Image (cartoon, rainbow, N blue to C red):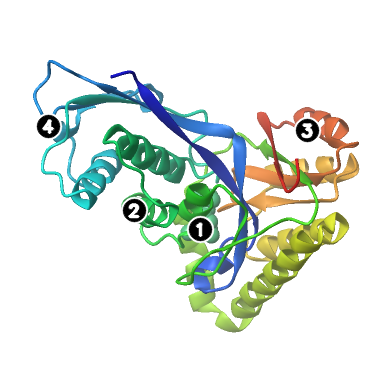
Amino acid sequence: MPAIFETAPAKTILVGEHAVVYGQPAIAIPVHDLRVKVVMQALPIAQRGTVLIKAPDIALQAYVDQLPEEHPIAFAIAQVLAHFKLEKSPACQMSITSPIPIGTGLGSSAAVSVAILKAYASFLGQALPREVISAMAYEVEKITHGTPSGIDNSVIAYEAPVYFVRGQAVELLQAGERFEFLIANTGIAHKTSEAVAMVREKREANPGLYDPILQQIGELANEARSAILKGDAMALGRLMNANQTLLGGLGLSTPELAVLIQAGMRAGALGAKLTGAGMGGNVLVLVEAETRGLVEEALRKAGATAVYHTQVGKA
Ligand code: PMV
């Protein structure tokens, strides 16, 4: 049997991070150019049940039964086996490679889970519907992140812009125009769980101050949804800037993030904000086709350790 492979994209949150944890809407988009790849090969002479995992990016090489049951990779595989009512896996090797930087808000863990679920199901000669992949990836995300909102697994499983409210069916957004984005890395990794805990503590200590901020972020997400559907890039840029101000109010911005945001805006971007948990990680910058090159150069000059591109809407 020839090797087969599947991939899954990174993601970036366009508006609504953190507030989404408290039931507000948020919008996330896939980063198509940055993809996890999972290659499956049969191991014809190995015993049934043998699954050899190779993940060089995290220096992991192990048989799945050597991993703890709640290891994200083992758990993803176990869910697929259970779904198809298989007791033992056909002998195989699973090779996982990811160019997505870890801990920078680009959804590396959810992308790895989605790529594994798709590739392993394909290897079994099966296909899983996107909603099942998303639900299974969410279960894996809970191991990695505690109480994630579910936005990462949704946008990555559907590979489309999603309007997301916790506990509700996702809405896939059809952009009215093409929107171009740059994503620039501060080079500083963050821990999502720490950022989420910090916001929780602040909110519990002073709900009168923080609840209105979270609610205003939710309102921005609703306005951003309309701007995307209409294809209004100017409006979307303004909403991203307003979101950044509110995220700053939650204490999630840092000088490094601010430097990149300012550099992008000075070079002609329409909007810029931190994306994901904040306190490091990446900024998301809305550009126009004509200014993309200038903005990218400015971001690199301002210290971005990497700049990625993504777009939504018409090609
Ligand atoms: O993993 P990150 O950095 O994209 O952050 C996740 C976004 C949060 O809203 C902060 C948390 C969540 O679970 O949605």
**Depth check, front residue: 299 or 177:** 177
Mark earlier in primary sequence (4, 2) = 4
Label 3: element kind: loop
Residue 79 as seen in the image, left or right of residue 153: left
Q: Is residue 121 above or below residue 245?
A: above
CA gap, disc 3 to disc 2?
A: 39 Å
**Depth check, front residue: 207 or 58:** 58
Label 4: element kind: loop
Mark earlier in primary sequence (3, 2) = 2
Mark earlier in primary sequence (1, 3) = 1
Which amino acid is tagged 1?
A: Ile
Q: What is the quadrant of residue 165 in the picture? A: bottom right
Mark earlier in primary sequence (2, 1) = 2
- Give the residue pinned by disc 3: 302
Residue 74, visible in the rendered structure:
yes
**Disc number for residue 136:** 2
- Give the residue pinned by disc 1: 151
**Disc number for residue 258:** none
Q: Residue at x 82, y 28 (%)?
A: 297
Q: Position of residue 93 (x, y in %)?
A: 26, 23
